[in-house]
Image: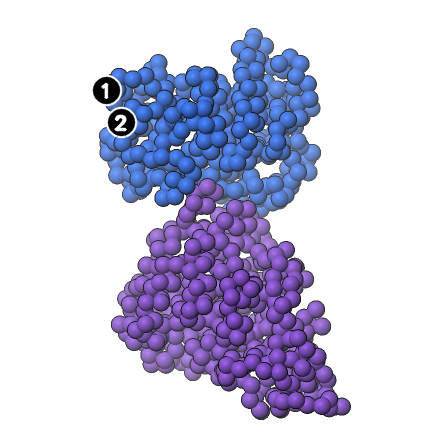
Chain colours: A blue, B purple
Amino acid sequence: MLEQKHLLGLEGYPGKDIQTIIDTAFNFREVLDRPIKKVPSLQGVTIVNLFFENSTRTRISFELAQKRLSADTVNFSASSSSLKKGESFKDTSQNIEAMKIDAVVMRHPTPGSPKHLTNFIDSVIINAGDGTHEHPTQAILDMMSLYEKFGKLKGLRIGIVGDIMHSRVALSNIHGLKTMGAKVTLCGPPNLIPEHINDLGVSYSNNLDEVIEWADALNVLRIQKERMGRGLVPSTREYRSFFGITSDRIKNHKKEIVIMHPGPMNRGVEIDGSVADGDQTIILDQVLNGVASRMSILYLLCGGKTVEGV
Amino acid sequence: MGLEKISKNVLLKGGTIVDPYHNKTYKADIWLKNGDIFDIGNFDIPSSSDIIDCTGKVVTHGFCDLHVHFREPGREDKETIKTGSIAGMAGGFTRVCVMPNTNPPLDSPESVNFIMKKAQECPIHIHPIGAVTKGQDGRNLTEMGLMYQEGAVAFSDDGIPIQDGAMMRIALEYSKLIDVPVINHAEDECLRAEGVMNEGKISTRLGLPGNPDLAESSMVHRDLELADFTGAKIHVPHVSSAKAVDLIRKMKQQNDNVTAEVTPHHIFFNEEDLITYDTNLKVAPPIRSEIDRMALISAAKDGTIDCIATDHAPHTVEDKETTFDLASFGMIGLESCFGVVNKVLCKESNMNLIDLICLLTMQPRNLMGFDSDLFCKGSSAEITIIDAEEDWIFSKEHIKSKSINSPYIGKKLIGKIKYTISKSHIYKNS
Ligand SMILES: [Zn+2]
């Protein structure tokens, strides 16, 4: 049904397949609104959630998607530090595959590790975030949410605001949105924007107000507290004054703008609580669409053969 | 096949002699007695000699590599001086300089002596490079004079850049006592930071932390200034960037004590090859852009680069078969060297074969002060016999090193080593 066996990233991922995933996700969205939110589509399919890094939200979203599809799931969590102590990535993954599984959902701190995993195992691999590389399922749920709001992706103007350098969400969004015909402008402190990002066909501005005037929607990235005071960002106060989605800043702009955030939010840092809870945001829709798009991805990749009940 | 002691007289018959020292190419036979060159000319077949048919082959000086890591002492599971020697012979090398970043490092006259003793049992000539600082700590100068007397031919903390400019100055000044080169692995550690590949459009796409070219060029600039200021000899290893090439080219116009090397991998690959996340391509300094690769090729052609050095860096499968961030830096390079540089420089970039041979023989020898007039009667034979036209696919069976971390496996190379003769031994490749 989809061209590629795995979902490793959105760079070079076919646009028609992104559209198929989104369309199917809307079907599953209906399932989630029913009183009994479960379909038998992946009965007998076994999926391992292999998390080498903590990520409560992504893991719960995947788990829920798997349960709603009636798949059997196993969770494996290991801190990357225990890996560093000698248990090899290869051994861990081969051991898990030996237990006869069909798909692996992996979160790992190292860029490229899902691709690396394809060298060792035959199962379907879904990248749930690989370091600062990609987070394709997040970008798909973001695009689904935009689609829900605007009825299209082509021609949309999207601003991505914050720490682009350390963000897998940004890279996957850039690739996905470009493929689907949207325009992307990045906005953030110059030292958190990769030097060569222009090669990806996006624009950059360090003036958030200009980006707000230009954009149909903003995807606001989490600015990690660890970056503060490490010399990358001088202070929270300074960051907010230039790049914070504050209620004052939003009030100053007359136009309507849709605000997204992949979570978890730092209220009072990159976004004000009052903005986050306001009418312009679609943050909670993103969460629900996250489950629906992951159902869609799992269904399409894990050979869901019947569509009954959908 | 493999390594044999030469027990009989040997006639290298009908080959094309390429003599880089006299800058001459001519057809002749070389007659060896007891592993020494007895005569060069045209001879009838003497009955008591083994004949090696060299028709269509190039017969030239044994190659000399100024930059190898043989891991002994400390990591004999990756390589030993003995296994490294065999890998060298398979690649046409009869003389190598081993880097001192072993465990413990070669930072005393005793450790230099340990290598010299091991070297005696090997079929190729092995010269230790001593550490610049004790324990490669970047702070305390080693006993360079005594180490030189034991056999150290140059000094380097390779693997660890000398960050402190004052320390580098002290090392350069002191090295004038013995007049040998100081070799600094030029990378500013603060700018390099966590970088695991070249910073550029590919690192941005792959999400891997980048190491910018100016991490190299800024330190090369510092080192060249210091060398010029002190009047000492500096050798810049594994140059990787166009920026560093420009600085070296400029300084060479005013200073004869500056030399530089390039590795085969920095002229064969570019950053786009890392798109597969192949950890065998994780090296320090990193493989850079196509612009940098082209600049290195030009530098090899115009004399800015003095020699080819492999930076042969063996690692275990476990050290490489891991995620990109955890994988060790380095690749092996002795066995594949000629097929790589001949393909890139002679076949793709119009360099003359004799000029390439100079980069592998006379020039590295001269800069280390080794004898480079090898084709004279009575001298101990260091000879490499090459088929410069043969196309072949590099594969695991061509690897003689203890480690197999080579990104060339499966790649087409041009030019193959047929025989290597050194220290009364002959190595025949399959
Ligand atoms: Zn080095």
Q: Callout 2: 10 Å neighbours few (<14), some, many (20+)?
A: some
Q: Are marks 2 and 1 on the same chain?
A: yes
Mark 1 lies within 8 Å of ligand 1 (Cβ measured): no
Q: Secondary structure at mark 1?
A: helix
Q: Position of residue A111 (x, y in %)?
A: 49, 42
Q: Residue furthest right?
A: B47
- Observer-nearest of A218 and A201: A201
Q: Are marks 2 and 1 in contact (CB under 8 Å)?
A: yes
Give the amino acid at mark 2. Asp
Q: Which amino acid type corresponds to the residue marked 1 in the rendered image? A: Asn
Above or below for A290 versus B25:
above
Residue A110: assigned label: none
Under circle 2, the secondary element is: helix
For the residue pair B254 and B186, the one nearer the viewer reads as B254
Q: CA distance from mark 2 to mark 1?
A: 9 Å
Q: Which residue position is annotated with label 1?
A: A252
Residue placed at 44% from the left, 53% from the top? Answer: B289
Q: Quadrant of residue B12?
A: bottom right
